Image (cartoon, rainbow, N blue to C red):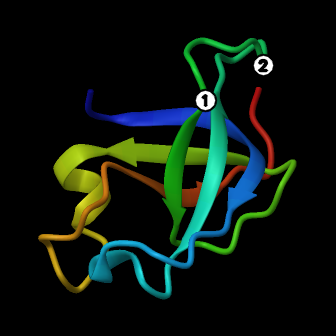
Amino acid sequence: MSGLFMAKVTGSIVSTKKDDSLVGKKLMVVQPIDRELQHVRHEEIAVDFVGAGVGDYVLLTHGTAARSVFEQPNVAIDATIIAIIDSFD
């Protein structure tokens, strides 16, 4: 899966034991949506790069693009929140 996807942040994850590459990163539960705000897949976990909160609509990226925003490209990340959506038509 590649490209940008819309999602709604539905929760957060607290994890005291995790891969070193995830230390200091905020983990969020996101529900991918379509333009009618309908769920399109199952919920997933994404690393928050922009300070999103529960209830925010966000843009997600996956795979290599999700890791490229971090200084260490070999992090254990497959989905990253890269923008908070203010509005869409």
Of residue 43 and residue 33, the one placed in the foreground of this image is: 43
| Above or below, 55 relative to 8 | below
| Above or below, 54 relative to 71 | above
Residue at image location 49% in from the left, 87% down from the top: 24
Of residue 21 and residue 70, the one placed in the foreground of this image is: 21
Q: Is residue 31 left or right of residue 74?
A: right
Considering the image in quadrants, where does the C terminus appear? top right
Q: What element carries label 2?
A: loop
Considering the image in quadrants, where does the N terminus appear? top left
Q: How far apart are marks 1 and 2 (CA)?
A: 14 Å
Residue at image location 22% in from the left, 70% down from the top: 75
In the drawing, what numbered circle is on residue 43?
Answer: 1
Q: Residue at label 2? A: 37
Residue at image location 63% in from the left, 56% down from the top: 28
Badge 2 amino acid: Leu
Between disc 1 and disc 2, whose residue precedes?
A: 2
| Above or below, 57 relative to 77 | above
Residue at image location 53% in from the left, 46% down from the top: 45
Q: In this view, does 41 lie to the left or right of 53?
A: left
Pointer 1 local density, CA inside 10 Å: few below 14, some 14–19, many at least 20: some
